């Protein structure tokens, strides 16, 4: 005779409700979009905090807009990486490969060669667009926001400013953007649509977050190339590597005094 007053066994609970404690955390498009929103929210918050701090320090209400911008992006990048660390650790190890937190699926030597080849190809195309095509339509000499910041800080000869810029350009910025755009956003889109569509949409969003608009085709190309590297290797560290190398290239170009192309 069945005892209806007795508590259901653990096996019965798993049959009725499923073993929720063992279900792996799934990356969704909603979460990918949320990552983009959180990134811009952190940037807005950091910008307000840094601007207000400068107003408290400077009674005239002034402030160096480039330094404020640098500190704001640096602070927001650190905030985003801390949130990423928290989200990954609370989601469990099954969440790692969904964000590309795994070794490359192709051998590291081949992956690095692929990164170098794509890096070279994209920078040749960027040079053609920036230094050949744009001057033909009277748009020569235009540089991106990052290069403007670098040029300004280099002109001030501020050592702390340059250290902050290099930290942002070579560490915080590339890691943060690849985590958000490739790790969260592209990965989530790729679960519901073809890879080329996921890369294209991600690159459009990435492009829209950079300035000036005349350089958008170049930013789209870079993002698409990095997205393809991520798709090909399934490893976020390879996407980060090519992003770092790209920024490093333009940093060396800047120090050398040549035309900055991004």
Image (cartoon, helix red, strand yellow):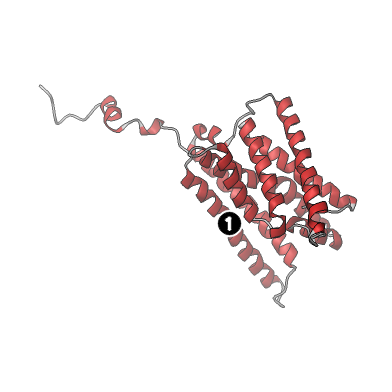
Which residue is rendered at x = 55% and y = 44% of the image? Answer: 185
Q: Quadrant of the N terminus?
A: top left
- 71 and 36: which is toward the camera: 36
Q: Quadrant of residue 59?
A: bottom right
Q: Relative to 156, is 59 on the left or the right? A: left
- The residue to which callout 1 is attached is 40
Q: Relative to 122, is 44 on the left or the right? A: left
Q: Is residue 95 above or below residue 213?
A: above
Residue 261 is at least partly visible in this image: no
How many numbered dots are placed on residues in this image?
1
Q: Position of residue 212 (x, y in %)?
A: 71, 60
Q: Quadrant of residue 85?
A: top right
Residue sitting farthest toward the top: 1
Which residue is rendered at x = 70% and y = 26% of the image? Answer: 108
Q: Is residue 31 above or below residue 233?
A: below
Residue 27 is at least partly visible in this image: yes
Q: Residues within 10 Å of mark 1 (few under 14, many from 20)?
A: some
Residue sitting farthest toward the left: 1
Q: Quadrant of residue 227?
A: top right
Residue sitting farthest toward the bottom: 60
Q: Position of residue 238 (x, y in %)?
A: 68, 35
- Secondary structure found at label 1: helix
Q: Position of residue 152 (x, y in %)?
A: 81, 62
Q: Relative to 25, is 40 on the left or the right? A: right
Q: Is residue 30 above or below residue 3?
A: below
Q: Relative to 249, is 21 on the left or the right? A: left
Q: Position of residue 35 (x, y in %)?
A: 54, 49
Which residue is rendered at x = 74% and y = 46% of the image? Answer: 170
Which residue is rendered at x = 64% and y = 37% of the image? Answer: 228
């Amino acid at each position: 005779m069945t005892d209806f007053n007795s508590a259901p066994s653990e096996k019965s609970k798993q049959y009725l409700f499923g073993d929720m404690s063992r279900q792996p955390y799934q990356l969704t498009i909603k979460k990918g979009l949320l990552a983009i929103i959180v990134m811009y929210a952190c940037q807005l918050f950091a910008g307000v905090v840094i601007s207000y701090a400068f107003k408290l320090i400077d009674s005239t209400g002034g402030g160096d807009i480039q330094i404020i911008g640098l500190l704001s992006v640096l602070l927001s990048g650190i905030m985003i990486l801390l949130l990423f660390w928290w989200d990954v650790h609370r989601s469990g190890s099954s969440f790692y490969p969904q964000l590309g937190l795994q070794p490359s699926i192709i051998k590291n030597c081949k992956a690095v060669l692929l990164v170098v080849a794509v890096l070279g190809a994209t920078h040749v195309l960027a040079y053609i667009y920036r230094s050949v095509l744009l001057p033909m339509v009277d748009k020569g000499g235009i540089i991106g926001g990052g290069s403007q910041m670098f040029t300004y800080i280099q002109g001030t000869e501020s050592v702390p400013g340059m250290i902050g810029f290099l930290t942002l350009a070579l560490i915080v910025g590339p890691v943060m953007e690849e985590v958000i755009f490739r790790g969260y956003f592209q990965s989530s889109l790729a679960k519901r649509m073809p890879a080329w569509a996921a890369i294209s949409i991600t690159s459009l969003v990435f492009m829209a977050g950079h300035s000036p608009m005349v350089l958008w085709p170049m930013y789209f190309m870079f993002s698409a190339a990095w997205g393809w590297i991520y798709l090909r290797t399934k490893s976020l560290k390879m996407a980060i590597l090519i992003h770092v190398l790209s920024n490093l290239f333009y940093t060396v170009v800047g120090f050398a005094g040549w035309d900055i192309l991004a």
